[in-house]
Structures are given as C-alpha cells and as structure tokens.
Image (cartoon, helix red, strand yellow):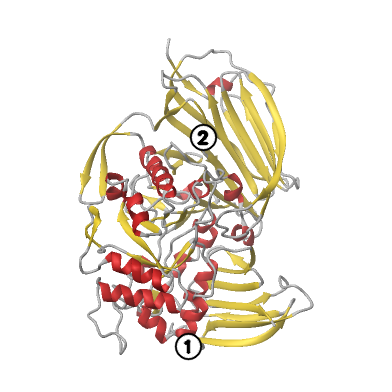
C-alpha cells in the first residue's frame, strides 16, 4: 500500500537521540537536536539562546515504508582541511574545520548537522526506493525558524516565483511580517537584538528548486516553486508557468539535499569575512581550471555605447567603430575583456548571425591584437534553444557569455543553470548569469560560473540608493559573487539626481564608486561607464584598473549593518581599502595593524571632498607614508566612500 511519508512524523518513536548536542570547534556555538513529533533544533552562542525549537523535515510521496522507524546510528566526526577556491573572493586559502553529527534512521533518511566557529548548517540525506528509475516526488520541505517577536528582519521581498532578486530590502520586526505579506528571497539577515546576527541561506543546490521564505505564526518557514506542467512563452525572453504540479521536485531517492546554513556573527565585521558558503559548497567538477581567467570588463550598455570628444570621429552606437573604441580603451588600461550586450546579433533569437554593423569577427580579431577578449550577452531562452552555441563561440574565440532574464527559480530552471555551466565548461567558456537568482554553490562545482546578478545594482540608476546598497556586503555578497556593475563617473546626491542614459549617473559620491571595486566581489567586475569619462578622470581610472577581482586575504576594518562597511583586501604584497556609508556622514579611524610590522608603506587614497555632500563628484586624492598600527582618520560624506591602495616602499 502506498503512503505519504513525512520525515518528521517518522521520528516520533526515536528516543535515543533526544537532546543530542553538537558544538563548534571553539565551543562557542552549540546546536541542540530534539526528536518528538518532528525534528527540532535550537541554536546557542556562548550560552545565549538565539533560535529555539526550529524544525525541519521533508515530505516524499509514493513510498512504502515501515511504521516503526528507529535511529540506526549516530555518527560524530570532525572535518578539517584546507580549501583553495578557483576564484577566491575573500581568501586564497581557507581553513575548513567543523564538528559533524549524522543521524541515520532505519527508514533510509539521515540528517547531517555541522557546527563551525562561524555558524551552523544542516542537510537532509535520503536513501529510499523510488520508481523504476529511482525517482521520488518531493511534495514539500519544512525549514522553519522560530523567531522572537522583537527580532529584526532584513529581507528582499518577492511577489512570486518569477523574482529576479532585484527588489530593495525591507526591514521589520518579526511580528510585523504577516502571513499574508509577500514572501522573501534568500539570503535573509536576522538581528536577534541579543548582540548576534544570523544570515540564513542555502548552498549545494542541484536538481531542486530555490528556497524562499514566508511568514508563519511563530517565525519564518520555507516555500518553493512547484514543478511546471504547462508553460507559455511571452515575448523573446520569458516563459511563464501556467499550470503547476502538486510537488516541488522529482528527483533521485538516493541523494543529499541542499545545505541550509546560518552564519552567526557577534561582530558585524564577521559577516564581511565569512567563508561558510565556500566551506559547504560542492567540490569542483572540473579538473582543468587554468583557463578560467576572472577579470574586469568594459561594458557599453549602461552608458548607451556613446563615447564622444575630439578623439571620436565616428557616429557612436552599437557598431564596429564604437566597439573598437571600447577595445582600445580596455587595452590602454589593461582591462582584459569587453562585453557586447544586446544588439551584437541581428536577432536575439539567432546567436549565429552577428549584426552587420558590428562585424563581430573583425572585433574578435582586433581584440586579440590588442589583448582584449570578448564576452557576449544572450537571453537564456536563446541559449536553451541553441545549446551548441558554446562550441561555435569557442571556434570564434569568444571567452565568456552573459546570460540574462531567467526570472524563474523552479527545479527545471535550477537544472538549466547547471546544464549551461557544464556545456560552457566543455568549450572553456566563462558564464555570468544575469537576471538570476543568488549564488547557491554552482560557482564552485563549475567555477567557470564567475558571477551572478541577483542584486539591486547600478542598472537601477536612481533606484540604486546607498541606503539599500549598504546592506549588500552583509547579505547578498556574503553568499557569492555579485554583478553590481560599479564605476559611474557622473555622481549625484539623491536630492539632486538627474541622470539618464547616455549620461547615466549614480547616487553617491565618486569615492563611493571607487570603493565598490574593493568592497564588492565578482569574478567579472564591470566598468560600467563611458570610456570618454574614464579618460577625463584618468586618476580614478588608474585606481579602478589596479584593483584585482580575486583576493588572497580580507580584513574587515569597520562594519555596522545598514550603516557603514570598510574592508582591507590583499593581493600579493599590495593592500586595498574600500568603504562606503549610507545617507549619514561619519568620521572613522582605520587601524592599519593588518600591515606587516617593521616596514614603511605608501598609502594613496581617494576620499570625499569637502563639498561631496552637495556635489558628489568632489573627491580628494592624497598620498602619505604609513606603518603598521597607524590610525588613519577618514571622513565619509553622506552616501560617501573611501578607497585606497597601500604598497611597500
């Protein structure tokens, strides 16, 4: 007889595991696991209860199982080792140390918990029979965080499962998020108001839908897009689900499910340095990764491909002469790539026929001559219908693709991301997913995936406000690379904003824009503005183009969630500093104790000018000699920033 099986209910009679505990290696974080009518867990930090009686489970339909299920074994272990990320966003080497407990149940289900010094994680594992192909249907998954009413939530709302993860954050008490309100994307940041913050997210997502959060009676719980049974194409880049199944995934009965993790920080700086998502991510499926070359990109869309001035003797636009101008700019400034956005092809439907005005093959040849490679923009739907384009692009000499407008988060779309990554890797093509969900581990399994959008970035023009952007280092960028597209040279304060393509502008100061190249992490970091403006501001351009996109070490110098974030990052023997603030100006003192002692260094900085609070393009460049332990006073304007490079003398 077939039965519907809820993992939580199968554990009713399991008594021997009641009250099981797991602590982090340093003993400061503890998880207590209780089994009664379902699997419960509570989280403590230094004895302070942060989450109590949270619960988890999975609902699998179509299984014949025994009623009297018991714990088969409880296995404890310690995991240690060193990770070397292919594209290191924070550290080139990461020490991975945690304590682990696996509860194995006789019915073929297991739950694995890990406790790290920076947080905890769990995942469900199944080894259960399925149909003749080994498949089972997942009706739903329970991931519920019980929250106290005064906990403060920082959330990115989503009206439905077509979310592009580009809405602004909302901030409200847990009791203020109602069951009838919109759901939210991951990651979500929880301020316990007990001195600790919790970042909740997922990784190692494969053959399974993205998790969203919704309000429930005693906290927040998981919700997922269901499997599509019928679809309808709308326009050239969107496919709407018109009929859903009654299950969220059909997948193998023998598998592990995504990690659900909580980064736990007592100091907000810990969020900026966290590498927990890397530690939990899947291992690389690629043996050869030497061809993956992250780098900066000159981008034409934001500035409407509109160079001008005495050196421009051609009609600017999406044509051969303009793209050669972009290549020349990239070459002169040692930017390794340009991106060719929508318009390079005759039609978005046909990725094999370049626009005659553009002459792609001549640009590829010209770029090779100038040591500049090309990344091409595509809609996801065109890629799906022409999956052999990666082979063709490799023959042409294209190094990367920017794939846009996925705007879905169901199991099929998650699998699409992985199919694309795998196929692109065959032909040594890098991938930037735009119009995407947030990173969930695929960028480690297929490290040719070098960035994702999934952010309210500079494309939003006036809609990209520093009061929202200041949360990104503490939330969005923690979980993985972020294609924010910084680098605006026309800068305005919000009360006088008037930018519009081709004279696109940013909100915030010039120093703020420079700082983003250090603070924000992406394997393909865009220079969004017009080469003409970069030439006119060569001192700023020289700083930007020196900033690496991969790092050996990261030190958070100053951090208050929602207010200010300042980091120092090292590449080789050079250090860079980048920091931004919200709409409130402030005075900081930056401690340079991270520098090796006994040496002298030159610090070249870009700080907000005396009038930056009114004229956002006002900045001051200065140079000074410093030593380890020096305290550098920094004054940040409202919506301001600070950027610096430190080299040994």
What residue sits right under mark 2 in the picture?
A: 257
**In the rendered image of this protein, does residue 116 appear above or below residue 125?**
below
**In the rendered image of this protein, does residue 618 appear above or below residue 260?**
below
> Which residue is pictured at 37% across the width and 70% down the height?
367
Q: Which is in the foreground here, disc 2 or disc 1?
A: 2
Percent across and percent down for residue 428 are: 44, 53
What residue sits right under mark 1 in the picture?
A: 611
Quadrant that contains the N terminus: top left
> Which residue is pictured at 66% across the width and 80% down the height?
632
Report if the CB atoms under discs 2 and 1 are less than 8 Å apart: no
Quadrant that contains the C terminus: bottom right
The residue sitting at the top extreme is: 1
Circle nearer the N terminus (2, 1): 2
Exactly how many numbered labels are in the figure? 2
Percent across and percent down for residue 90 are: 60, 60
| Residues at marks 2 and 1, CA–CA distance in whole angstroms | 53 Å
């Amino acid at each position: 007889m077939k039965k519907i099986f809820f993992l939580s209910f199968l554990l009713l009679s399991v008594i021997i595991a009641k009250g099981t505990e797991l602590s982090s290696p340093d003993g400061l974080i503890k998880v207590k696991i209780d089994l009664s009518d379902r699997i419960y867990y509570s989280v403590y930090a230094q004895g302070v209860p942060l989450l109590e009686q949270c619960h988890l489970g999975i609902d699998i339909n179509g299984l014949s199982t025994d009623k009297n299920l018991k714990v088969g074994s409880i296995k404890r272990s310690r995991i240690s080792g060193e990770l070397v990320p292919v594209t290191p966003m924070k550290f080139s080497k990461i020490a991975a140390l945690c304590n682990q407990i696996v509860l194995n149940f006789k019915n073929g289900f297991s739950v694995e918990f890990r406790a790290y010094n920076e947080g905890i994680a769990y995942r469900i594992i199944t080894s259960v029979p399925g149909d003749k192909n080994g498949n089972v249907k997942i009706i739903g998954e329970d991931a519920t965080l019980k929250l106290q009413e005064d906990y403060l939530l920082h959330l990115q709302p989503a009206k439905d499962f077509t979310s592009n993860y580009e809405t602004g954050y909302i901030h409200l008490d847990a009791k203020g998020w109602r069951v009838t309100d919109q759901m939210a994307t991951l990651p979500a940041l929880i301020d316990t108001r007990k001195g600790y913050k919790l970042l909740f997210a997922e990784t190692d997502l494969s053959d399974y839908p993205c998790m969203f959060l919704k309000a429930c009676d005693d906290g927040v719980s998981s919700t997922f897009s269901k499997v599509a049974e019928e679809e309808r194409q709308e326009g050239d880049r969107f496919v709407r689900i018109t009929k859903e199944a009654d299950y969220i995934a059909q997948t193998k009965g023998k598998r592990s499910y995504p990690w659900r993790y909580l980064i736990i920080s007592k100091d907000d700086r810990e969020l900026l340095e966290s590498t927990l998502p890397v530690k939990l991510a899947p291992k690389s499926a690629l043996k050869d990764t030497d061809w993956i070359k992250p780098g900066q990109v000159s981008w034409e869309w934001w500035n409407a491909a509109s160079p001008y001035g005495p050196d421009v003797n051609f009609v600017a636009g999406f044509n051969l002469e303009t793209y050669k101008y972009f290549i020349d700019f990239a070459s002169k400034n040692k930017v390794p790539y340009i991106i060719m956005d929508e318009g390079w092809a005759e039609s978005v439907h046909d990725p094999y026929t370049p626009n005659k005005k553009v002459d792609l093959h001549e640009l590829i040849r010209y770029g090779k001559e100038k040591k500049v490679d090309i990344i091409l923009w595509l809609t996801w739907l065109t890629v799906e219908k022409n999956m052999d384009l990666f082979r063709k692009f490799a023959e042409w000499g294209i190094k990367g693709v920017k794939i846009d407008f996925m705007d879905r988060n169901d199991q099929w779309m998650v699998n699409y991301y992985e199919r694309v990554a795998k196929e692109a890797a065959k032909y040594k093509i890098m991938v930037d997913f735009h119009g995407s969900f947030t990173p969930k581990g695929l960028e480690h399994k297929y490290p040719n995936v070098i960035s994702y959008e999934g952010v309210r970035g500079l494309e939003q023009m006036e809609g990209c406000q520093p009061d929202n952007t200041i949360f990104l280092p503490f939330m969005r960028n923690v979980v993985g690379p972020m294609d924010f597209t910084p680098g605006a040279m026309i800068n305005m304060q919000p009360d006088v904003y008037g930018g519009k393509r081709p004279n696109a502008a940013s909100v915030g100061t010039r120093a703020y824009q420079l700082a983003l190249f250090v603070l924000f992490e992406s394997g393909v970091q865009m220079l969004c503005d017009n080469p003409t403006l970069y030439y006119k501001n060569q001192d700023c351009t020289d700083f930007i183009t020196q900033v690496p996109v991969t790092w050996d070490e990261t030190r958070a110098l100053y951090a208050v969630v929602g207010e200010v974030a300042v980091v120092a990052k090292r590449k080789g023997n050079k250090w860079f500093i980048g920091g931004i603030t919200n709409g409130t100006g402030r005075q900081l003192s930056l401690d340079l104790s991270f520098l090796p002692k006994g040496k002298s260094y030159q610090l070249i900085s870009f700080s907000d000018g005396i009038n930056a609070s009114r004229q956002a393009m006002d900045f001051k460049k200065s140079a000074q000699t410093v030593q380890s332990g020096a305290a550098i006073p920094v004054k940040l304007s409202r919506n301001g920033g600070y950027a610096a490079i430190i080299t040994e003398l």
